[in-house]
Image (cartoon, grey):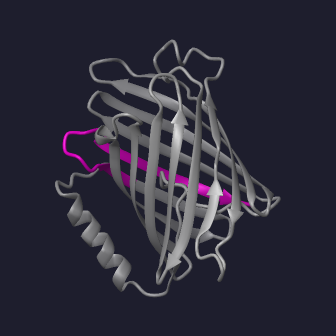
């Protein structure tokens, strides 16, 4: 298991900024796996993108592992993409024996309704996603919360000088109190082989945004060949003594 301890997140952001400023041969970078925040990009029509990853989230009451998280995407048209995502979860609560089972299924359709052009400097998309419980014992055993949930986010993306910048904001309808999600990713690509990304992402109840779960997250994509990328990220809560204490993502991205 990998994790890091940095007392002041500002130090990490200064290190990242130094890397971004001084490495050469930059181009656009964007969100999506391994980051939490999504961008407006879609898989080309008739093509597949499959992300298979080991994930971890550690909090004050234990940790949850995705072993693996499987994220399958297909390009329906030039501007439309279908996603199906499902994890196998291992839950370790403090002082209890670990339990495992199938996580919730998430189905989404991204539609980019405005491209970034000379006339329109900002690309825009929507990405409605429906998450539901599978017919297993995962809810009864406390592996997942009882669903369903529906997320309606808006994504934006642009290029500012040497940097690709994108963000999203959305509303999640769920059992209990609904939530707002929001995030921003900044990144650059180097020599067409490596992307470095930095992210701030938040999730909070609609009537208590001052208690939002806000994380900073650093990630990279490393091109192995034309159809395979290594994708990784790691982060934690910006607020001291708030969850999550650590989040991590390590996976492979296959395109064909």
Which residue is found at the position 32% from the left and 17% from the top?
96
Q: Is residue 75 above or below residue 105?
A: below
Q: Answer with the quarter of the image where residue 242 lies.
A: top left
Which residue is found at the position 43% from the left and 68% from the top?
186
Which residue is found at the position 49% from the left and 54% from the top?
37
Residue 29 x, y percent position in the rendering? 52, 71
Question: Is residue 76 part of the magenta span, yes or no?
Answer: no
Which residue is found at the position 41% from the left and 36% from the top?
206
Q: Is residue 63 above or below residue 35?
A: above
Total numbered labels:
0
Which residue is farthest top? 140
Q: Quadrant of the N terminus?
A: top left
Magenta part mainly helix, strand or loop? strand
Question: Is residue 236 part of the magenta span, yes or no?
Answer: yes
Q: Is residue 17 above or below residue 248?
A: below
Residue 34 x, y percent position in the rendering? 50, 55
Which residue is farthest bottom? 24
Q: Nearer the viewer, residue 46 or 225?
A: 46
Left or right: residue 130 compared with residue 91: right
Q: Nearer the viewer, residue 229 or 79?
A: 79
Q: Answer with the quarter of the image where residue 105 lies.
A: top right
Left or right: residue 228 compared with residue 221: right
Q: Quadrant of the C terminus?
A: bottom right
Q: Magenta span covers which residues? A: 234-256
Q: Is residue 90 above or below residue 234?
A: above
Residue 84 x, y percent position in the rendering? 68, 41
Which residue is farthest left? 7
Residue 184 x, y percent position in the rendering? 44, 60
């Amino acid at each position: 298991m990998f994790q890091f301890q940095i007392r002041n997140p500002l130090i990490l952001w200064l290190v990242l900024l130094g890397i971004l400023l001084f490495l050469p041969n930059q181009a656009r970078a964007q969100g999506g796996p391994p980051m939490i925040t999504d961008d407006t990009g879609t898989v080309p029509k008739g093509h597949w993108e499959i992300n298979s990853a080991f994930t971890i989230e550690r909090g004050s009451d234990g940790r949850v592992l995705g072993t693996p998280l499987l994220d399958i995407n297909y390009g329906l048209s030039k501007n439309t993409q279908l996603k199906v995502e499902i994890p196998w979860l291992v839950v370790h609560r403090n002082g209890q024996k670990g339990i495992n089972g199938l996580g919730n299924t998430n189905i989404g359709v991204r539609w980019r309704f405005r491209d970034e052009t000379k006339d329109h400097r900002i690309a825009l998309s929507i990405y409605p996603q429906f998450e539901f419980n599978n017919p297993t014992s995962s809810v009864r055993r406390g592996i997942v919360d009882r669903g369903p949930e529906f997320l309606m986010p808006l994504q934006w993306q642009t290029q500012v000088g040497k940097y690709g910048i994108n963000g999203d904001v959305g509303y999640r309808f769920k059992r209990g109190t609904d939530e707002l999600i929001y995030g921003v990713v900044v990144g650059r690509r180097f020599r067409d082989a490596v992307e470095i990304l930095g992210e701030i992402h938040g999730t909070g109840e609609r009537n208590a945004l001052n208690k939002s779960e806000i994380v900073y997250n650093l990630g990279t994509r490393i091109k192995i060949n034309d159809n395979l990328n290594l994708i990784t990220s790691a982060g934690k809560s910006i607020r001291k003594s708030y969850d999550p204490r650590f989040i991590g993502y390590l996976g492979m991205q296959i395109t064909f």
